[in-house]
Amino acid sequence: MKAIFYSVAIAAACGAAFFSFNQSNKFKALETDRLATIETNKQTTASAEAADTEIKKERALLATSVEKRGLLEQSVSALKSSGIALNNDVTKLKEELKGQDADFEELKKALEAVNLVLDGLGGGVTLETLPEKIQQIEDDKKAKQTKFEELEVAIAGTEKSLAASLAESDRISKRMVERSSRISRNAMEAVVTAVNQDWGFLVIGAGSNSGFTPQTPLLVQRDGRMIGQVKPSSIEPTQTIAEIDLESLTPGVRLQPGDRVILAKPASN
């Protein structure tokens, strides 16, 4: 039994030793892997830190580049603005040059006109002697102006005399027309067109166009014989309604259509 026990113990001890050795080898392998992993992590961390440092540098360079780009864009924008301003200035200068060319042309024409004037003033007149010639012209102009004013005064007097003569002629003409009108009215005759015995009025075939007025007394004739008087009460352009003066009627006579009417008092001339 003991031998068997010893054999089992030895076998157990050998198994334990083998297991311990095997575990030791595994531990060593694990330790080696752990150390390798730690080293790898250190390298990875170093690489990451280096990469991070490099990234920070690149970011700094990028920020610098962006800043430089912004400055460059501002410079380009400023240059563009300056270019536009220069183009505008060039355009303005061109316009001014065109205007100056036009001014030069005008000056040239003015100079030619001055030369023509100088030629027209007679020989020997130059720009140096021009003031003297201008003074001479001014004096001549003043003399002519004085003469012109004298003529205006004379013309004004003549016009007044003519106006007075025309007014007198017009007055005489009006008097002649009025006289002719009065003469015409003195010789005027009108015809009774209707008679109303009940109301005591008659209608005459002439009115204001013939010179009748409410103040015009009228005589009624028949066969050249005076038979009564009437007084206008309503006058129209072509007819007159007149009241019959019953007291002026010849006894036994009644006015009737066809009787003639004349002015009772001739108009004075």
Image (cartoon, rainbow, N blue to C red):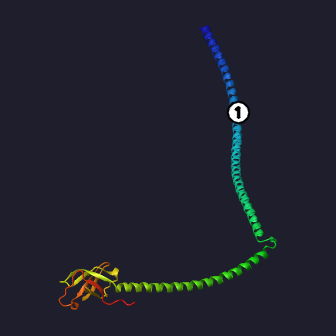
The correct choice, above or below, for 96 with respect to 242 in the image is above
Q: Is residue 61 visible?
A: yes
Residue 158, image quadrant: bottom right
> 246 left or right of 107?
left
- The image shows residue 218, relative to residue 109, as above or below, that is below
Residue drawn at 77 percent across, 68 percent down: 119
Q: Quadrant of residue 252?
A: bottom left
Residue 94 location in percent, x, y? 72, 55
Camera sees residue 230: no
What is the secondary structure assignment of the residue under circle 1?
Answer: helix
Residue 269 falls left or right of residue 239: right
Where residue 156 appears, as percent x and y from the top left, is 59, 84
Q: Which quadrant does the N terminus fall into? A: top right
Residue occupying the point 50% across, 86% down: 168
Relative depth, front residue between 47 and 63: 63
Q: Amino acid at mark 1?
A: Ser
| Front residue (pair 245, 262) | 262
Direction from residue 216 to residue 7 in the image, left or right: right
Q: Nearer the viewer, residue 234 or 76?
A: 234
Tell me if 62 is positioned left or right of 195 in this view: right
Which quadrant of the rendered structure holds the C terminus?
Answer: bottom left
Residue 132, how many percent across, how many down? Answer: 79, 76
Disc count in the image?
A: 1
Mark 1 Cα shell of 10 Å, populated few (<14), some (14-19), many (≥20): few
Residue ID for mark 1? 47
Q: Is 216 rendered above or below residue 138?
A: below
Residue 172 location (% of width, % of height): 47, 86
